[in-house]
Image (cartoon, helix red, strand yellow):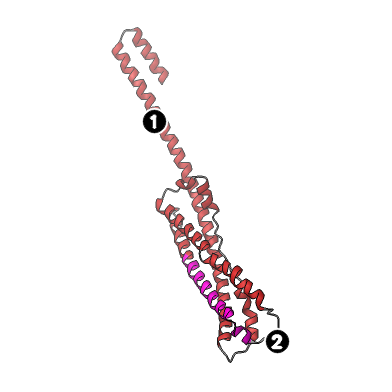
Amino acid sequence: MIKFFRQIRYKLMEAGKTSRYFKYAIGEIILVVVGILIALSINNWNENNKNSKKEIVYLNKLISNLEDDIDLYQLIMANDSTSMNGLRIIQDVISNPSDNNIGKIKLNIQNLMTGNNFIPNRTTFDNLISSGQIEIISNDSIVDQIFLYYRGTEDLEKGIDKAIAEYNRNTFGPFILSFGSFSDTNEDVSKYRNENMMVNSVRFKLNLLGNQLIRYSSQVDNANRLIDHLKKELNID
């Protein structure tokens, strides 16, 4: 087409028809500009289409990661509930002068030394951040929710999870090593009942696990809400 216009311009110049030459020249320029704009539009459409496909992949991966998190939250919460039941048994024996069943204490004492920390599946989120692809997610509200959720997991790590780990490592661990063997069948309940550190440890560990349960339950709700929003964005029922 451009070659066709050029041939016409040359003929017009040879014929001395300057005004018509300029009209054809302007027409040629307009044609080139229109062609460039069309090419840019097609390129932008292709780029947006590729980004849209990437966004779908990332959102689906985020859903999968969040579902993994929920499974782990629920597993730890179930373990916490079991541990708390065991600690309550110890607490009941220690607080009841007429209960001298040392077996109940020995059966449940390990709950004072155990604990579970949550480790989120951050694979997709970290990939989005490190690669600079977070902008592919077009819904700013969802981006904000994603950041809030993972900030919540960091708060758990630095808060209640760290407190439980430090308690097990720095407080009860050294105490239990100095307390004696739990395999001694000749022990009396009074050994535990009269030890303030033991009594306080049971109470403190129950409080820690209770707080962990509350915070984990809240994070499960946050994860479920985020999954719902992601599925809505993907038009998944």
Q: Horizontally, is 101 left or right of 62 in the view? A: right
| Main secondary-structure element of the magenta-colored stretch | helix
Residue 48 seen from this side: yes
Give the residues in magenta: 189-218
Residue 123, image x and y in percent? Answer: 55, 53
The residue that appears at 40% across and 51% down in the rendered structure is 140
Task: Kindly identify which numbered label has been placed on residue 116.
Answer: none
Q: Nearer the viewer, residue 199 or 101?
A: 199
Label 1, secondary structure: give it. helix
Residue at 55% x, 63% y: name it.
Answer: 118
Q: Which circle, 2 or 1, is nearer the viewer?
A: 2
- Quarter of the image for the C terminus: give it: bottom left
For label 2, the SS is loop
Q: Residues within 10 Å of mark 1 (few under 14, many from 20)?
A: few
Q: Position of residue 36 (x, y in %)?
A: 40, 28
**Given the current orientation, which residue lies at the most extreme left position?**
19
Taking the magenta stretch, the answer to whether it contains residue 46 is: no
Q: Nearer the viewer, residue 165 or 217?
A: 165
Q: CA distance from mark 2 to mark 1?
A: 91 Å
Position of 145 compared to 181: left or right? left
Disc sitting over residue 37 in the figure: 1
Q: Which residue is mark 2?
A: 186
Q: For the N terminus, give its image quadrant.
A: top left
Foreground: 109 or 78? Answer: 109
Q: Which amino acid lies under the numbered mark 1 shown in the image of this protein?
A: Leu
